[in-house]
Amino acid sequence: MQDQTEQTLLARLAERVGIVADYHDIAGNLHLTSDDTRRAILTAMGFTVDSIASLTEALREWDEAPWQRPCDPVRILRDGETGSSVSCCLALEDGKERSVAVEWQVRDEANAVVQEGHAGPGLSAVEVRFLNGRRHVRVEIPAPHGLSLGYYNLTLRAEGLVGGVVGTMRVIVAPRQCYVSPAIEANHRLWGLALQLYSLSSDRNWGCGDFTDLGRIVEWAGKGLGAGVIGLNPLHALRNTAPYHISPYAPYSRLYLNELYIDLERLPEFFGSEEAQQQFHAPEFQAKLQALRESRRVDYDAIATAKRTMLDLAYRKFLKDAYSGEEPNLQPNTARGWLLERFIQSEGTPLELYAAFQTLEEERRLIQSKSATWHDWPKQFLTPGQPVREYAKRHRKRIRFFQYIQWVANEQLNEVRRTAEQLAMPIGLYHDLALGADRNGAEAWIHQSVLALGADCGAPPDAFAPEGQNWGLPPINPHALRSSGYELMIQLLRNNFRFGGAIRLDHVMAFCRLFWIPRGRPASEGTYVQYPFEDLLAIVALESTRSKTLVIGEDLGTVPDWVREQLAKARVLSYRVFYFERGGDGAWKSPGDYPAQSLAVATTHDLPTLAGFWSGEDLQVRAGLGAFPNDAARHQAWEERQRDKGGILSALKREGLLPHGVTEDLATAPAMTTDLCRAIHIYLARTPSCIVLANLEDGLGELSQTNLPGTVDSHPNWTRKYAVRVADLLCDERLRQLGAVLRSTRPLG
């Protein structure tokens, strides 16, 4: 009986907090959520659920929480919405509400009062609840109205009570839809190139692509090829140590940029530093740079060491020239000094904490060990509280160094953005916001109060990963996120939307539901947790509108139809991959079957390139890694690939796009040729999709895919460089011809 009672309470609490009781995978198989999974996820959310007593208490606290606070932590209002109200909960004796008045004040983001009002005396109780012998009432007051788009702080004060009652609420006024660029509004169908920035090789970079390389690509593609957009891998800050800290989808922090992309040779203080120049021109350093350039793989550790060393020397020169006075009262006395100070002021506390984390980590790794993470730090530094603020004051110069790095990176990326604008590219840079961040990184330390560090997120079983996927990233706790007024989400969107004309939201379904896996367990023991979809979508629409950024939602995998419908209503573009766009019979969809409100692309970083798909390179790699349980499974995968290739040839034939000499017979197309690659991209260009992207590796005929999911150190993920250098890309005939056919099919207008 006790076990049954405990199970009932566990299921009830799980349902309250949004843990689903069951789910269907992509194949339609039903999966039931086990009690062990419920208990582990509830624990990760911060609940104590180890007994009937603790479960009973957790349920009571959950149900009573809305009555114990004067108002909700956040309220979303849609632009132009009228007639709504705000609830206020007060502990009052019978009838006392008639003698209580509620005053409120609304302040904007500049802390200016923009609205005031009051209700009562003579309020009516809309609902009454008795908690621990006390009478609590819910009264309604008019919601703020006529506010422009943005974020506001609403303060409620209940007068007529002993001591008074004060409540605060973040009010978010959002549009109903995301921003859509004028070119797309005018039904122009755009095309662009997608690339991995680190993969660009050149005779001048330091072993990986940088912002100067990116600027050259943007100018060439925008001016010479007629491209309207350049798609990029996430540029988030990484620890840049192989093999575990180089994935752009498991970053150190999604709020800031990777310093590896900085071009040191564009910094005046780098050239002004005698020490930097002496080290830079030393034969051994030049030999190291040459080796890094010539390598076909990105050596993150070596490049990071070289760039950090030179950034340090450049910063010392910068401090000497740009500031006067002594710590902690350094005063800027040059134009560049003032630019940095203005950047530091505009970025505020979030950047200060990020820099404090890096300074602490740098110091603690010298004191403790290189393998130590912030979880191993002394108690006073485990959370970003007062001891950390005092530490930051004592280490102001080093804190400013990490702020300087972000300023330099911002300046260089913004210069590329301005280049795209000057070329009148309709969208310009298209960025990618990763789903999560490394639990041992800066973002997790700063925002640990809204993360479920005792869980991972991933994906349920599907054809791509029959056992499911565990991405090893801590999920955001939706309840803690809402209690914070969605602060982390707002910062993430704002910091990432500011650098370009479009952004891809990785795994956009996470705004609705996310697959949680108890820490240390396989993906098969996970289940879905629900998120406040409407609220989060409203914030996306607000930040998109403010920054004039087009939003693309990566909606691959197990996606309920209604989620896609809501995203479409909000004008979030769907992300359509050629490999997956098939009908119920497995045949490739015709171009006309693609939705107009979408971005179409042949393949992604997690899938084989076109050349790799055609040759079966990915299947051979997986076989070599033991990914197939037996020869029969490997043979089946190969047979399926042959059928898929035949299906692609049939689809191209229907559109009259088969290259000369190629028929539906696979023997006539033994390899992915330039002509066949071009035909597939023309196929995509004929779709009504707003945007079509061509991956640079497909245009170059690259064989190996960027990332092989499920591997870390057994496969060279995120390290391959393009075989063709930047200078040669600009005159590569394959890319010129591909650009020509895409431009003719999708003229800019």
Image (cartoon, grey):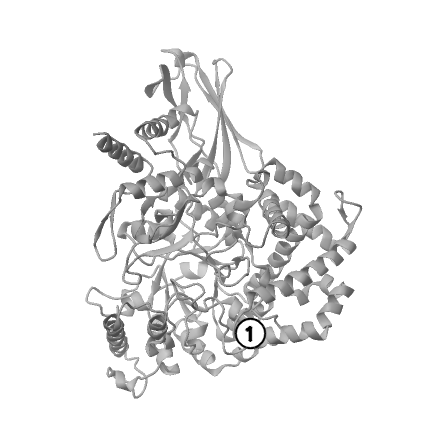
**Residue 678 or residue 450, whichever sits in front:** 450
For residue 38, what is the image quadrant?
top left
**Quick one: SS at disc 1?**
loop
**Residue 461 or residue 102, whichever sits in front:** 461
- Name the residue furthest front: 368
Q: Quadrant of the C terminus?
A: bottom left
Instruction: Name the residue beneath numbered marker 1.
Output: 201
Residue under the point 57% across and 64% down: 301
Residue under the point 41% across and 19% down: 90
Kind of residue at disc 1: Ser
Q: What is the x, y in percent for residue 15? A: 29, 37
Residue under the point 34% across and 34% down: 50
Judge whether 328 appears above or below 552 on screen. above
Q: What is the x, y in percent for residue 569? A: 34, 50
Q: Quadrant of the N terminus?
A: top left
Residue 584 makes an appearance in the image: yes
